[in-house]
Image (cartoon, rainbow, N blue to C red):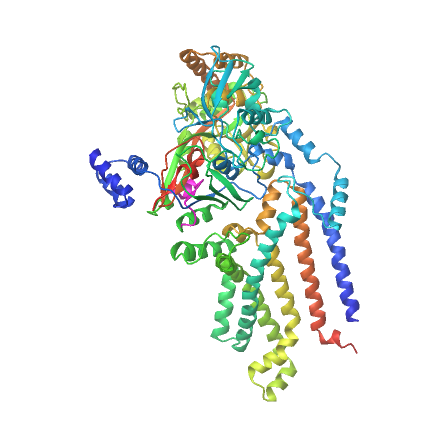
Amino acid sequence: MVPKLIAQRIALGILLLVAVSVLIFAGTNLLPGDVAQAILGKTATPLALENLRREMGLNDPAYVRYFHWLFGILQGDLGTALTTKLDIAASIRERLWNTLFLAFWAAIVAVPLAVILGLVAVHHHNRPVDKLISGLALASTSVPEFFIGYLLVYFFAVKFQIFPGISTVYDGMPFLDRMKAIALPCTALTLGILAHMMRMTRAAILNVMQSAYIETAELKGLTAFEVIRKHALPNALAPIINVVILNLAYLVVGVVVVEVIFVYPGMGQYLVDHVAMRDVPVVQAVGLIFAAVYIFLNVVADVASILANPRLRHPR
Amino acid sequence: MNDELGFLSERVAKGKLSRREFLGRAAALGVSAAFANNLLATAARAEGPVKGGLLKAGLQGGAATDNLDPATMTDAFQFIASRQWGETIVELDADRKVQPALAEEWGSSKEAKVWTFKIRKGAQFHNGKEMTPADVLATIERHADVNSKSAAFPLLQGIDKIAVDGQNVVFTLKDPNAEFPFIITAHQVVVQPNGGKDNPTAGIGTGPYKVTVNDAGIRLGGERFGGYWRDDRGFADQIEIVVINDGTARNSALQSGQVHMINRVDPKVVELLKRFPAITIRNASSRGHYLFSCQCDTTPFDNNDLRLALKYAIDREEMVQKILGGYGSVGNDTPISKTYPLFTEMEQRKYDPDKAAFHYKKSGHSGSVLLHTSDVGFPGAVEAAQLYQASAAKAGITIEVKRDPGDSYWSEFDKMPFKASYFGGRPTQDMTYSLEYQSKAPWNEFHFFNEKFDQMLVQARGELDADKRKKLYSDMGQIVRDEGGAILPMFNDFIDATGPQVGGWATDGNQELMGGYALSKCWLQS
């Protein structure tokens, strides 16, 4: 039963990805203006526009361009950018790596922190410590990211000059420099996603804590922390995994604002630049990668929930 | 008094007195801050440039889609970069005069139809090859080609033939043009090996810095090119341009010392930034202007009285104060500011609700006038349109403001009869009028068709007598001011800022960051 469920999820994910590719292609074609107009901007003359359009093959019908694109991708070829004429896969690689690097370290800090804070909050349920943790976490999430970003820059980059305010990282940068460069954006991201995960951990465990078997565990003399770790946490795992993965997906696909503030060369800024220029192949490629990451992580979440659910693992 | 200031400024240059103390004493002596800053710059230059170090600029105007082809450069990153790795044939100095660069000297035939440029020997491309007249010729050919995407293409249409003659490049023009050298100062016309026909995006030129890193939309790094031919540029060992499109991030990068200079300081925060003693605001009056343009062949704008009504209904002083934060000067409905060669003073048009109402009534138009605006029209275009709406309302003219999305604004631009717009300005009156106001001009967004104006333009171009030419331009300016489609309230300043270590800065309003040369002409003080 479990393998079948998992296979279903994966198949659904792939189907979804194909549907998304159509949506992305259609969406990019609805954008007003075209790449030739965007490149030439205000200085466009009809002659220059025509020259550029012919050179870029923009005069083919849309469906021809779609299938051309799709077959390319199936062969692992994302195409070349219209504006820079560079191979898209090659230019995305470094950007994607940067984004994943930042997301990875933000997750490494945020996830354990959130879960531990959640556990501590449950332990001190409805007492000042719980209130304090929830209050701070909610406050940091409620403040818009760009504001947190600017506050961090103001204090840590301008006032005390501990960390750099612009996080330009590049290939071949020493690891420690790189870590120093991402310190502030990483903190901003952590503060942004902390509350969601922490609150969910707290709620899920509290929910379980009302159950009869927890009372039994308490009555048989386990310490409070052991009750949470051995009995409450495993049963609350599914919703926690879900919210953690949702936030991981956000770390990859939703960090445009943070990237702009800290001038971090990730995928978000790369996408925005190309949307502005109507460089459709790049927008499509990035859109597809984002969609793939999102769908993949959701499939992982589903599978993990299935595996974490004893009722599914041990069917009667 | 001046002796004392001069002495003090030298002490600052030697590092024995802080800039802030100096400015304080200068103020006590009753000297304006601008003058005092100038004195400082002079002293710093006199002290001599310092070699070495890594000079960094943080710029707005870069994207992941940029490449290094000078023909299609669109914004600051590509432009500033090209100034460091490449050079033009001749260039403009801060006084807007043409100076030698890759051409040592030049001259024209008597009727200004044949122009001969003697190309310098000993300038080297970064690939080790010697720059030759053939490269210059190929460069012009590439930009002037019909299939070219070059933004300089319309500029070069006056060229009939071009040939190499020994060390000379000879241009034969279709019509006489007394100001031809100005045309090839265009920043797109960067001399590349074989004109960039083989590899336009290589970033190989004769400039002081060789491109070592080019990460589009992120950064560009350069190191001093050993074979560079002149010694008054290229002082830092290395330069770096970092793209920082967010204004607040740019300011904080300058404050924290991560970059040494930035461009495009928002007029709204200039006063705040000035409070940091280490930061110097560098503004320069430019030829660039913000305007509202209407199409003279579309109702109701085909009526000159309505156009005049709209011209009298705008409060220029208010625009300069509120939109430019005082960093600019008022316009007079012509694109020619007093920085232009052969400029003639005209009566300044002022905000006059009575005259506006008079002309509005005379035009016979009733109902509202639709004005398109957008964030990309010019910085502050939406606010400016609202101010315009308010000042026009006092004259009984109803302007309906429509805010359009930025990403389709330029593609829909020609379909809007009345809209916010901007021009960067061009070095000569002839270039400005030929490209923007003449009937057949490629950027005649005013749909301004005036036969007499066109005739005078051609006449002036071939007129070698400066007085006569000046008179012609004066008459043409009057036509544009009183009949044209430009409601031109303001000329904007370039507002750059530098950190404490930057030496050698000089005001140059040709383009932002000292005409684009700041990274090459400035140095890092110890």
Q: Which residues are magenta?
A: B257-270
Instruction: Work out which residue is located at the far bottom of the displayed protein and give it.
Output: A220
Residue B485: x, y in percent? 52, 23
**B405 or A24, which is in the foreground?**
A24
Q: Does residue A166 appear left or right of residue A273 in this picture? A: left
What is the total number of numbered labels drawn onto the structure image? 0
Residue A127: x, y in percent? 49, 76
Q: Residue at x 48, y 52 (%)?
A: A166
Residue A275's place in the image compared with B312, above or below, is: below
Q: Does residue B522 appear left or right of residue A56 in this picture? A: left
Image quadrant holding the N terminus of chain A, namely bottom right
Say which quarter of the image contains residue B270: top left
Say which quarter of the image contains residue A16: bottom right
Residue A74's place in the image compared with B408, above or below, is: below
Image quadrant holding the C terminus of chain A, namely bottom right
Q: Residue at x 57, y 29 (%)?
A: B151
Residue A49's place in the image compared with A242, above or below, is: above
Q: Is residue B323 visible?
A: no
Q: Does residue B96 appear left or right of residue B115 in this picture? A: left
Residue A100: x, y in percent? 60, 58
**B106 or A258, which is in the foreground?**
B106
**B358 or B68, which is in the foreground?**
B68
Residue B66's place in the image compared with A49, above or below, is: below
Q: Is residue B489 visible?
A: yes
Q: Is residue B263 magenta?
A: yes
Q: Is residue A296 magenta?
A: no
Residue B369: x, y in percent? 55, 28
